[in-house]
Image (tube, rainbow, N blue to C red):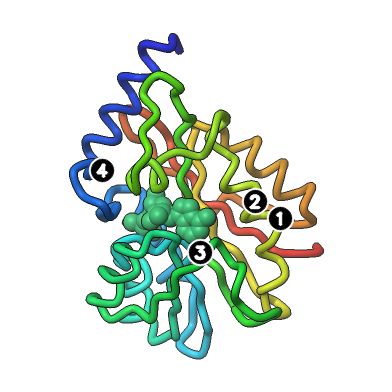
Amino acid sequence: MSDEADAETSDALAERRGVETEVYQPAEDSHLLAEVVVERVDAGDTVLEVGTGSGYVASSVAAETGARVVGSDVNPHACRQARERGVEAVRADLTEPFRDGAFDAVVFNPPYLPEEPVAARDDWMETALTGGETGREVTEVFLDGVGRVLAPGGVVFLLASTLSGVDEVAEYAGECGFSTAAVRDESFPFETLTILALHPGE
Ligand SMILES: C[S@@+](CC[C@H](N)C(=O)[O-])C[C@H]1O[C@@H](n2cnc3c(N)ncnc32)[C@H](O)[C@@H]1O
């Protein structure tokens, strides 16, 4: 894709995903992730949603499964909005403050658009949407650390997009010691979204 086409794609995605607010609002990626997680989490589970944003995914999973769901986000406005939805939200960088082995499932819809130097902004929507030059930078830091907070038998549900490379994310997860399975794909005009289920040490 040309740089111009890339920029148009990202602009259109950003537009649909609520650039005018300080908090990412639920979009097709949020709905896909919530649907997959609701089908795979049990009432007795403790779940962490990293980057909870508006709290939509966390509150849907809690309401529909009965699981205890905690949300984290670097954006204080997101934490406030998630709390208003009833989510126990912690301002945090990824999984950093949580104790070892605390969660049966960790869920993340990461910022994944490749950064465009020309259009780069410095605001909370940028934090929600872009994952550095490759689009995978936040995802990779997440993968480096998430194994620590998983309980034995725990699982990670991670969203990836063709806009920043699904195979590359799966490969990096493998390098971090996870076995990876694609559990749901959905195609949209600009991209295909995939939910990856990651199990440690298999
Ligand atoms: C694509 S949005 C997803 C929001 C919400 N989970 C959803 O699906 O609608 C990504 C979210 O990750 C948050 N985020 C970005 N970097 C983060 C980090 N290092 N630690 C925690 N949250 C982060 C952003 O603030 C944003 O709320």
Does residue 183 appear left or right of residue 37 in this picture? right
Circle 4 SS class: loop
Residue 25 lies in what quarter of the image?
bottom left
Q: Amino acid at mark 1?
A: Asp
Q: Are marks 1 and 2 in contact (CB under 8 Å)?
A: yes
Mark 1 highlights which residue? 144
Mark 2 highlights which residue? 141
Circle 2 SS class: helix
Look at the image and tell me whether residue 85 can be seen: yes
Q: Earlier in the sequence, mark 2 or mark 4?
A: 4
Cα–Cα span, label 3 and label 2 = 14 Å
> Tag 2: Cα neighbours inside 10 Å, few (<14), some, or many (≥20)?
few
Query: Of residues 187 and 166, which is closer to you in this image?
Result: 166
Q: Classify mark 2 as within 8 Å of ligand 1 or not, answering yes or no.
A: yes
Q: Which mark is residue 107?
A: 3
Residue in view at x 49 percent, y 64 percent: 50
Height in image: 62 above or below 176? below
Q: Earlier in the sequence, mark 1 or mark 3?
A: 3
- Foreground mark, 3 or 2? 2
Q: Amino acid at mark 4?
A: Arg
Mark 4 highlights which residue? 17
User: Which x, y percent locates residue 86?
Assistant: 28, 81
Q: Amino acid at mark 2?
A: Val
Residue in view at x 60 percent, y 74 percent: 97
User: Which x, y percent locates residue 150?
Assistant: 67, 74
Query: Of residues 117 and 152, which is closer to you in this image?
Result: 117
Cα–Cα span, label 3 and label 4 = 19 Å
Q: Amino acid at mark 3?
A: Val
